[in-house]
Structures are given as C-alpha cells and as structure tokens.
Amino acid sequence: METKLLRGEQEKDLQEAARLLHAGETVAFPTETVYGLGANALDADAVRKIYQAKGRPSDNPLIVHIYDKKQLNTLTEHVSETAQQLMDAFWPGPLTLIFQKKQDAIPDCVTGGLDTVAVRMPNHPVALRLLQLADLPIAAPSANLSGKPSPTAVAHVQHDLDGRIAAIVAGGNCTVGVESTVLDLSGETPVILRPGGVTKEQLEQVTGKPVRYAAPFASAEETPRAPGMKYTHYAPEAPVYICTGTPEEAAEKISHQLKPHKGKAGVMLSAETLRLLKNKDENLVVNLGSRNDLKQITSSLFAALRYFDNSDVEAIYTESFPTEEIGAALMNRLQKAAGSKKI
C-alpha cells in the first residue's frame, strides 16, 4: 500500500484525508498529545484496519474523537453533571471521558466489547478541522506499532506505519507528548485509568471530588477499560532501567552501570542529573530538560526513546521523577517502558 503524505495546513489535503476516512481507510493525524491513527468509528471493517496496521490486540479499546459535544448524542444517552463540568473545563484538550455507550451505537471492536465508550475532543487545529470535514466520530489510538513508543512527530509515524495505512497528515510536533488522561466516571469516585495531560489535581479542583488512580495494569483475564492498561507499552528495543533516589544517587548508580557497556549504553536524564554523571562521554546521552519543568521532560520522553531505537545501545538508563501533577503521567510511561525494572 502506498501511504500518502498530506499537509495539515492545506485545506485540500485535509479534504482528501476526510474522503479517505469516509471510504473506510485509515489516516494518521496530529493531536496535542501524540499522533493518532484514525478510522470511522461507526464502520467495523475500517476499525479493524487500525488493529491490523498496528498489530494491536483487539480487546484493547479505542478512544473516539469528536469535534463537537453534540456528537455525544450518537454515542451515549447520558452525560452526568460531573462529565459536563469536565468537558466545559478541559475540552478541547487531553482528557478522555468514559461514558455508557448507546445500545448498538458503535461496533464492539471500538469498545473491546465493553458497555462503555471512551471519548475526547482533541485540542489541535489540524485534528479539529479534519474531524469537522469528516463529520464522523473517529476511533484513533496512537499511530505507532503496538507496544512501541508513541509518535510525537510525523517522522515517527512514517517509520512505523509507512506502507501500512492510507495516509499521514503532517502537522508538526505534538506539544503535550503523552496520551490523554482517561477518566472513568461510572462509579461514585472518579477513577483515572491512565494519567495524562490533565492532572489529578486539576480534575479535583474542577469537580470538588476526590479522584483516585486505578491499578496500572488489567489482569490477564479481564478486558482493559482504557488503552495501555494490559499490554506492554512505550518500550524501545533496548531494555530500560529506572535508577531511583535523589539526582545524586541516580547519577552514581548510572555511572556504575555504564562501565560494562563500554560505550553501548543510552542515558536520558534531566539537565541537573546529567551534570553529576560520570562515564558519559562514550555513551549516547539525551538531555530531557530541567527537573523544574516536568512538562518539558514529559514532552521529550517518547522522542528520546525513539532516538535510542535508531542506535545500537544495549540498555537505556534514566532517573525517577516526582509523581505530582504531570509527573504522574511521566512516571506511568517510564515504568511501562521499563517493565518496572528499577535499580
């Protein structure tokens, strides 16, 4: 299959992308979080092409993207007061809400067979215009091969999916750099199934309710209620190790670990920890940014992991970060990339 490269700033290219979506094809497009791989959420055959292109397990639910709150009427019969508050505060933006799905409204391959549907409105001009032109709810996971670091630049999508999908809409680098927060409102207490660009603290401020985190992984027997809860995600080819402790302790641990690799290790650290590191000159090193700006570090993470995939490193070492605010999403992705391997 030849994959068309379309330009997000060109209306005619967006019209072509919308035409392909109506024709049942898959199209990658930029959002503020990561690039998504979209298909008509009402067309089961089109949605199956997403799973085929990504090599994604079919019981992993997809997020449905919309451009207007009125589109919720075709997906769910009930929007709670809390959901309305959150939509008013964070849509468009990196927040996915889980609703009870309307009976027969959407194929089971979108929801993983669950009686719920995950929906968000992206905050990216290219994504919103494409959704408007298509005038369809679009199912869209991240536009990468399943399990690999999510794509935050068009080159990442091309590397993974060129020749596997109909088109890629280029729209610059993603600003948030990790996937949306997924919030389950089906119980008395809101539950974050996946931390992301909207933080627990922000959610609690808007709702006036306590918000808790779900267990990070679903069990082998159950269907995950949100993407990223059951299978290995965000992992580069080389194993990732998180060195815990203060920046001084992490730098000492990593300096010790680098010796046996003889220049074949990858290191991704904050600027502060990097200054403390020994034995770094022969190894591949990425400065993620200052520990005082966890948003910048979070937005740099997936690009750093993909950078190492294009090298021949034997292992990748990083540090741990605070888990308040956006740090919760950062550490969630790091822990999954590392398979929770810590030193």
Image (cartoon, grey):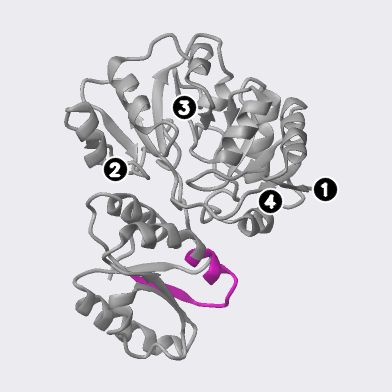
Neighbours of disc 4 within 10 Å: few (<14), some (14-19), many (20+)? many
Residue drawn at x 22%, y 36% is 212
Residue beneath label 4, please?
A: 161
The answer to whether residue 43 shows anywhere in this view is yes
| The magenta segment | 304-318
Residue beneath label 1, please?
A: 2
The answer to whether residue 221 shows anywhere in this view is no
SS for dot 3: strand
In the image shown, does 135 or 35 lie closer to the viewer?
135
Tags 1 and 2 touching, CB below 8 Å: no
Q: CA distance from mark 1 to mark 3?
A: 30 Å
Q: Which mark is residue 199?
A: 2
Residue type marked 1: Glu
In the image shown, does 233 or 76 lie closer to the viewer?
76
Q: Position of residue 114 (x, y in %)?
A: 46, 21
Neighbours of disc 2 within 10 Å: few (<14), some (14-19), many (20+)? many
Q: Position of residue 317 (x, y in %)?
A: 38, 73
In the image shown, does 225 or 139 lie closer to the viewer?
139
Q: Which mark is residue 50?
A: none
Label located before the other in sequence (3 or 4)? 3
